[in-house]
Image: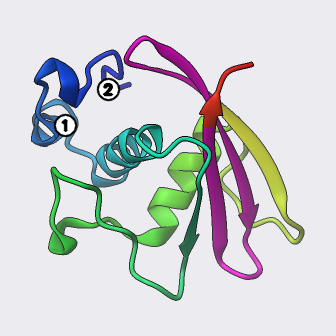
Amino acid sequence: MWPFHASRAEGIKRDECWKLETRPAVCYTNLLFLDLAEDLGREWLLRRSQPLPVPAAGTSPADLPDFAHVVNRLKILCGLDPVNYPRPVEGTIKLRVGAADVVVQARFNDVEGEVRLRMEPKP
């Protein structure tokens, strides 16, 4: 996985993600995690019916991956099978961003085409 020990405060540029990782969904989720880390506790909602949020830096709207690829990447990171579930399912992703251990709570609602993400400090 992309080196999350690096942060903007340490002078690492987000656009380096594209040099380290060429798969768009992987790079996008890495940049999304960095944005989540700057906004701990806030819930992010990704919807199939709306464009994906553009990360703070490192990509342009034209480079955004397909919603389904991002959802599958997030499911895999949560330890879930990348399939459509008939009921909402939840998963957890444990990361280290900078010097902080964090947990991303994810709730997938495939019927509605939604993913809810919230990053919080690891208890």
Count neighbours of disc 2 (C-alpha within 10 A) and say few if under 14, some if 14 to 19, many if 20 or more.
Answer: some
Please give the range of residues in magenta: 94-119
**Image height of 38 relative to 8, above or below:** below
Residue placed under numbered mark 2 in the picture: 2
Q: Quadrant of residue 71?
A: bottom right
Count neighbours of disc 1 (C-alpha within 10 A) and say few if under 14, some if 14 to 19, many if 20 or more.
Answer: many
Q: Residue at x 38, y 25 (%)?
A: 1
Residue that protrudes farthest toward the bottom in the picture: 49
From the viewer's perspective, is 85 left or right of 96?
Answer: right
Q: Quadrant of residue 47?
A: bottom right
Whether label 1 touches label 2, CB < 8 Å: yes
Residue that protrudes farthest toward the top in the picture: 99
Residue that protrudes farthest toward the right in the picture: 87
The three-letter amino acid code for the residue at tag 2 is Trp
Queried whether the magenta region covers residue 109, the answer comes back as yes
Of callouts 1 and 2, which one flags the residue occurring earlier in the amino acid sequence?
2
